[in-house]
Amino acid sequence: MKNYLMVLSALSLAACGGSGDSAPAGGDPQGFYQGTLENPAAGTNDLMWVLIDANHQAVMVDQTSGDIYRFTSFSASGDSFSGAYTSYSFSSSGLLSTTTTTTVGNGNYNSSFVPQSTISGYLASSSTSTPVYSFDGTYEQAQYVLAASFSTIAGSYSFKNGSASVSLDVTDTGSFTLSYTGCTGSGTITIPDAAHNAYELGGSLNCSGAIQNITGLASFTPAAGSTVAELTLEYDNGTSLAVQAVAKQ
């Protein structure tokens, strides 16, 4: 059966404590959401998706620009959650971007939520704390309420764009190997909640002898009809290099 896997990973963020800090009393915002990310000043209104797992590790991806917002802290109370993020912006839709096309930033986010229904909030810059983007997302039950297992996501995924390429191999025991032009990596995948479709990964990446830690998130989606197996892949070094690519199995 054909399938696709969405994988997001970020390097060197584990030292920041990740994004799993506290759970809200009024419910839990975990889930997979799809919606829009709007920048009123720039006149843009892009499609986006958000994944928040059971440990409150979380990431947002702008599907139009390829920009990534990794939530590096997460605190929830009642019907809202907030924290800090690290952003990675690209000049070429985030697909196999190089060190010269990546801009790294930091800021804060705040969102209200209705459990298993919606999220609505904003992203603010760290320099002014003024909201720059607003976002709204709808909970995708069919995407998130799927049992998670290593055998489900096992497979080989690859993407090629000109002379650059990305590949990921996942075994049925939860280990993985990762390669990008000039870099190789490996690690393990863990399942925070077997009842929900979210995976965490961790390991190391070697780029010309420079070794760094990697962490990440993944969500698996079975294919339907003629849909080909795909992998949306992101990783970064926390400072200057970030890669996002849509790979096929």
Image: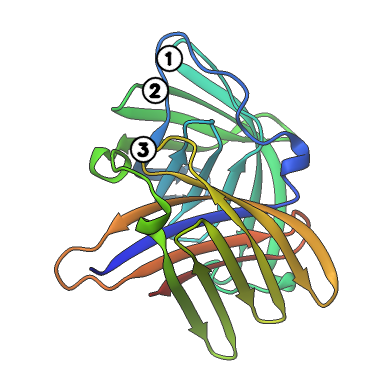
- Which tag is nearer the camera, tag 3 or tag 1? 3
Where 78 sits versus 98, above or below? above
What's the distance in space between the residues labelled 3 and 2, CA to CA?
Answer: 19 Å
Residue at the (53%, 44%) spot, across then down: 59
What's the distance in space between the residues labelled 3 and 1, CA to CA?
Answer: 21 Å
Give coordinates of residue 99: x percent, y percent. Answer: 74, 71
Label 3 SS:
loop
Label 1 SS:
loop
Q: Which mark is residue 196?
A: 3
What's the distance in space between the residues labelled 2 and 1, CA to CA?
Answer: 5 Å
> How many marks overall?
3
- Disc 2 crowd rating (10 Å Cα; few below 14, some 14-19, many 20+) is many
Residue at the (75%, 50%) spot, across then down: 12
Name which of mark 3 and mark 1 comes first in the sequence. Answer: 1
Q: Which residue is mark 2?
A: 113
Q: Nearer the viewer, residue 72 or 119?
A: 72
Name which of mark 3 and mark 2 comes first in the sequence. Answer: 2
Q: Nearer the viewer, residue 213 or 191?
A: 191
Residue at the (58%, 74%) spot, across then down: 96
Side of 35 where 6 appears, left or right: right
Q: Nearer the viewer, residue 96 or 182?
A: 182
Give coordinates of residue 63: x percent, y percent. Answer: 43, 57
Q: Which residue is mark 1?
A: 79
- Amino acid beneath label 3: His
Residue at the (69%, 74%) spot, across then down: 184
Name which of mark 2 and mark 1 comes first in the sequence. Answer: 1
Residues under numbered marks 2 and 1 in contact, where contact means CB atoms less than 8 Å apart: yes
